[in-house]
Amino acid sequence: MYILGIETTGPVGSVALYDPQTGQLSMKRMEEPMGHLRRLAEMAQELLTENGISPRELRAVAASVGPGSYTGIRIGVSTARAMAQALSIPAVAVGALDQFRLCCDGTRPVAVIFNARRGQVYGAVFDANGEDILKPGPYMLTEVLDRIREESVRPLFYGDGIDAGRELLTGFDLADKEERYPTAALTVRMAAEKLEAGEIVSYQELLPRYMRETEAEQKLRDGTLARLREAKMAKFRSR
Amino acid sequence: MKDGKFITLGIETSCDETSIAVTAEGREVLSDIISSQIAVHTKFGGVVPEIASRHHLQNINGVLDQALSEAGVSLADVDLIGVTNGPGLIGAVVIGVATAKALSLAAGIPLVGVNHMHGHVSASYLQYPELEPPFLALIVSGGHTNIVEVTDYNRCTVLGGTRDDAVGEAYDKVARVVGLGYPGGPKVDRAAKDGDPDAIRFKRVYLENGSLDFSFSGLKTQVLNYINRERMAGREVNVADLSASFQQAMLDVLVDKTMLAAEQTRADRLVTAGGVAANSRLRQMLAEACGARGIRLYMPEPVLCTDNGAMIAAAAYYKYRMQGPDDLSLDAYANLPL
């Protein structure tokens, strides 16, 4: 029985098919960045066809649910939800940062940082056994680095936050470019562990993990929205 | 197929309505579930695209379940999936398209992408079983103001359009400045019922002689200037009169130009489409104007004018018959020409 894994939270999307019994894993990556919507379903179909699998033979569908690009997350999660619904199979939610726990090989810690702009990252630091040193969440990059210094650990860095935070990261160990970004291979392997542990959800419960409220909600809460609206009306009135 | 009938699923998520419908043989509506987000966006004073996208994702699969069960069909009975793939709020359109493609892949059902505006025109096929192209259509919504000649199913020639604000946009902006809030169209329409359309004289903008194009931004400015003048003079603005007068100025131009288009093209049938076609005053004015000229008017029920999945299913059915399916590389577009 196969698991289909979807990872579209970063600039390069991918989809993978995994048979936990045999350990057989095949993956397809998008050639062009931001082609998530156009390519995802097509690539999933190609993957199934090339492996001689019908969608009916899928046991579960897994999606990397974020954090990451909001639209990217939604493309992956919507696709997984609809597939799980149509096939009456369970879904598995895999955290985009969490899946890097699989990179912890028992010898060294792992830090994952996704670029969230303006010095911010979605980040996490895991020890050599994949346990939290800093739990997945939204942070300033400097906060993540401070924590690493406090703990006196020497992690290997992953994620596209490396590319954006280069100056702050001199002297740190960075994963090779080919290994650096999230892939559906990680998603589907993590999903297999979760499936084994019974951590499944229904298609309705498979939801994005944005880790941030929208700008509009922030502005509504802190009163900025009301002030902006008032200023706009005042401008109208003073015409 | 269900009872020998061709079953189409129509999916619409281009703005703030998550809607899925099931139709039989193209025109018979078996279900049309509309999950509106109006309540969600009201506190922001308008549609917030990121929030709309988040809600579409949460709602769409439940809406699908409801649409199938109300129609008494299962996904296995569905012969075709039609989905709006533009124009619209891109993040919102994406949810419908991703869902439609995943259903198509998982259940092996053919897929077609539908232009949202062709969907609006196709709403009339649901209400009028005998209606077939060609005909003249007035498409009025939050994003569009067009007079088109519908030459065939999902095909049309644009005769005129707006050069600045769409009708629905003008409604929204005016509703905001007079404090009626979102959604502007229905709120102005309601307020106008208690007002005098001749109370305030706003200039009607007709552009060049014989032009079928529109410009509504000047009218919006006139309304703002009027409000300022009244406030400066310390007078209370009568919202009902203002709503009625503004609406009349806009609809006069809309109806006159539509009648001019009918004259120019010798059309004897007019179809109205789009959210603003639900406006009660516009419906009344078009009925009178068409009645006086012997033009047969096809005006779908308000629920079919606003965004809904059934109109997308209707458009999809004809597109599929004429052009066959799209493949799984179907993309979403913020802008998609008519």
Image (cartoon, coloured by chain):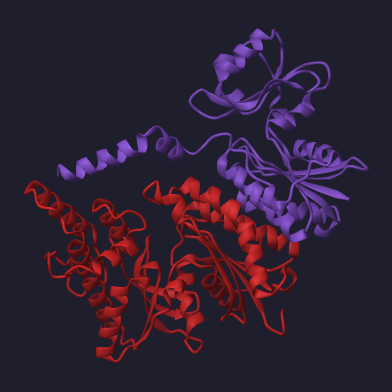
Q: Give percent across and percent down for residue B260.
A: 24, 80
Quarter in which the C terminus of chain A is drawn? top left
> Residue at coordinates 40% horizontally, 36% vertically from top-left?
A219
- Is B96 on the left or on the right of B338, as rendered? right
Residue at the far bottom: name it.
B294
User: In which image quadrant can residue B111 be found?
Assistant: bottom right
Could one spot residue B207 in this view of the protein? Answer: no
- Is B88 on the left or on the right of B110, as rendered? left
User: In which image quadrant can residue B246 be found?
Assistant: bottom left
Chain identifier for the purple-coloured part of the image: A
Residue B24 against residue A110 in the figure, above or below: below
- Is B138 on the left or on the right of A194, as rendered? left
Number of dots carrying numbers = 0
B177, B311: nearer the viewer? B177
Q: Give percent across and percent down for residue B118.
A: 47, 71
B173, B111: nearer the viewer? B173
> Residue at coordinates 71% horizontally, 16% vertically from top-left?
A155
Residue B31 against residue A12 in the figure, above or below: below
> Residue at coordinates 49% horizontally, 45% vertically from top-left?
B50
Residue B75 against residue A25 in the figure, above or below: below
Q: Give percent across and percent down for residue B98.
A: 62, 55
B276, A179: nearer the viewer? B276
User: In which image quadrant can residue B23 be found?
Assistant: bottom right
B209, B135: nearer the viewer? B135
- Is B190 on the left or on the right of B226, as rendered? right
Per the rendering, the colour in which chain B appears is red
Residue at the far right: name it.
A22
Q: Give percent across and percent down for residue A90.
A: 78, 51
Could one spot residue A117 in this view of the protein? Answer: yes
